[in-house]
Image: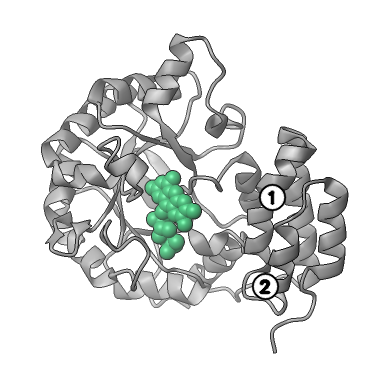
């Protein structure tokens, strides 16, 4: 039970309650996944996968379809954040305006944290921009004007490299440029996912922000860790990524713990299996059997992760390509015995 009452998060005029956010994750946090998270509850704000702003502009200039990554965004419940990336202020502003006017999103988030070469070295975007604070300022300030009054937020890492941790300086730039909140993943880009997220560093950033809230992110995988993050570190909210992929009920558990209520138990393995099959059906409804089955392989592995027989299940599910095969593999191999 938290020793103090945890206040809701304010992003501009938007109230996020509870202050627990579902992180953007490319390849994972599509509308089907978000629906599953919403059905369990506990996440105050959900986010899409990152959307490439340049690609989006190209698509609407050519009257092509909208990016797949915006599937669901127009219709689903709010609040919802859409994350975009690029290094060109004009392009970002164009897309932000469209997201606000046409899709009526609650928050436009900017990706300044992606460490993947395709985004950094090839497109000079994502975490690459942490070495160019002036450009970050230009992107944010343009986007803020284009999206007003919808809030714009930024998501960063601690810096590009352990030898160049500049998050305190970046935090000031982000606030001065008009962002309404800052999320920090407590690793540098060069760290990728190695080592532990450095929550002391995240916490230090708070002293460099005047008014906007700080959202801490990295390695939170239990309700207890979420409560401890609020108690030990100077953050206004937390964000969860990897741990919710196979455990979308984690937000509800963390939210209960923050309210000082008993943490709901993990669903039984049978219930978890049913959640996964429901998730699969949502994906099939959208993408059709063939594409959905291939897409679902990776989610299925997440649902099995940490369970007895997970490796065996993974081996089999990695090969399925029809609904019948998927159901047969789940029936036969999804772990139904808890780890002893
Ligand atoms: C598969 C995967 C995809 C991700 N995609 C994004 C993304 O699109 N945008 C983003 O800002 N961060 C992305 N991240 C980073 C997460 O949002 C988060 O910052 C990071 O995983 C640390 O949080 P965690 O320890 O709770 O996983 C991704 C992470 C993973 C594992």
Give SS at disc 2: helix
- Rendering coords of residue 294 (x, y %): 69, 46
Q: Residue at x 28, y 27 (%)?
A: 143
Which disc, if any, is residue 123?
none
In the displayed structure, does residue 103 sit left or right of residue 147? right
Q: Residue at x 36, y 48 (%)?
A: 116
Callout 2 environment at 10 Å: few (<14), some (14 to 19), or many (20+)? some
Residue 317, quarter of picture = bottom right
- Rendering coords of residue 263 (x, y %): 60, 74
The answer, for residue 16, to whether it is visible in the render is no
- Rendering coords of residue 240 (x, y %): 46, 60
- Rendering coords of residue 2 (x, y %): 43, 75
**Cα separation between marks 2 and 1:** 16 Å
Q: Nearer the viewer, mark 2 or mark 1?
A: 2
Tell which circle, 2 or 1, labels the residue nearer the N-terminal end: 1
Q: Is residue 234 above or below residue 77?
A: below
Does the residue tagged 2 have its C-beta within 8 Å of any atom of ligand 1? Answer: no
Query: Which sits in the foreground, 263 or 163?
Result: 163
Q: Residue at x 53, y 26 (%)?
A: 67
Does the residue tagged 1 have its C-beta within 8 Å of any atom of ligand 1? Answer: no
In the displayed structure, does residue 226 sit left or right of residue 294? left
Callout 1 environment at 10 Å: few (<14), some (14 to 19), or many (20+)? many
Query: Which residue position holds label 1?
Result: 296
Check whether the beta carbons of the residues at disc 2 and disc 1 lie within 8 A of each other. no
Give the quarter of the figure containing the C terminus: bottom right
Give SS at disc 1: helix
Residue 234, quarter of picture = bottom left
Query: Which residue position holds label 2?
Result: 311
Q: Residue at x 71, y 38 (%)?
A: 291
Residue 135, quarter of picture = top left
In the displayed structure, does residue 49 sit left or right of residue 138? right
């Amino acid at each position: 039970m938290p020793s103090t009452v945890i206040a809701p998060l304010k992003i501009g005029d938007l109230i996020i309650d509870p202050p627990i956010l579902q992180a953007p994750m490319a390849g994972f946090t599509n509308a089907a996944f978000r629906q599953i998270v919403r059905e369990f509850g506990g996440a105050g704000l959900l986010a899409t996968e990152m959307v490439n702003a340049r690609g989006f502009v190209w698509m609407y200039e050519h009257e092509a379809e909208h990016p797949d990554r915006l599937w669901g965004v127009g219709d689903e419940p709010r609040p919802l954040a859409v994350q975009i990336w690029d290094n060109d202020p004009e392009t970002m502003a164009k897309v932000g305006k469209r997201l606000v006017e046409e899709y009526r999103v609650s928050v436009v988030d900017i990706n300044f944290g992606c460490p993947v070469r395709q985004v950094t070295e090839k497109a000079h975007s994502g975490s690459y921009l942490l070495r160019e604070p002036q450009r970050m300022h230009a992107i944010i300030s343009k986007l803020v004007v284009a999206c007003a009054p919808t809030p714009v937020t930024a998501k960063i890492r601690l810096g590009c490299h352990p030898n160049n941790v500049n998050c305190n300086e970046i935090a000031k730039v982000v606030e001065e440029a008009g962002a309404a909140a800052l999320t920090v993943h407590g690793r540098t880009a060069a760290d990728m996912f190695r080592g532990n997220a450095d929550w002391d560093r995240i916490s230090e950033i708070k002293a460099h922000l005047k008014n906007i809230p700080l959202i801490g992110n990295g390695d939170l995988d239990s309700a207890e860790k979420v409560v401890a993050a609020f108690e030990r570190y100077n953050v206004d909210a937390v964000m969860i990524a990897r741990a919710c992929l196979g455990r979308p009920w984690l937000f509800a558990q963390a939210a209960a713990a923050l309210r000082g209520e008993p943490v709901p138990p993990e669903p039984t393995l049978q219930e978890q299996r049913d959640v996964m099959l429901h998730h699969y059906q949502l994906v099939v409804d959208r993408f059709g059997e063939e594409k959905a089955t291939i897409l679902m392989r990776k989610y299925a592995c997440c649902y099995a992760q940490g369970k007895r027989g997970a490796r065996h299940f993974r081996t089999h599910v990695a090969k399925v390509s029809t609904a019948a095969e998927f159901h047969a593999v789940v029936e036969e191999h999804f772990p139904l015995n808890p780890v002893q």
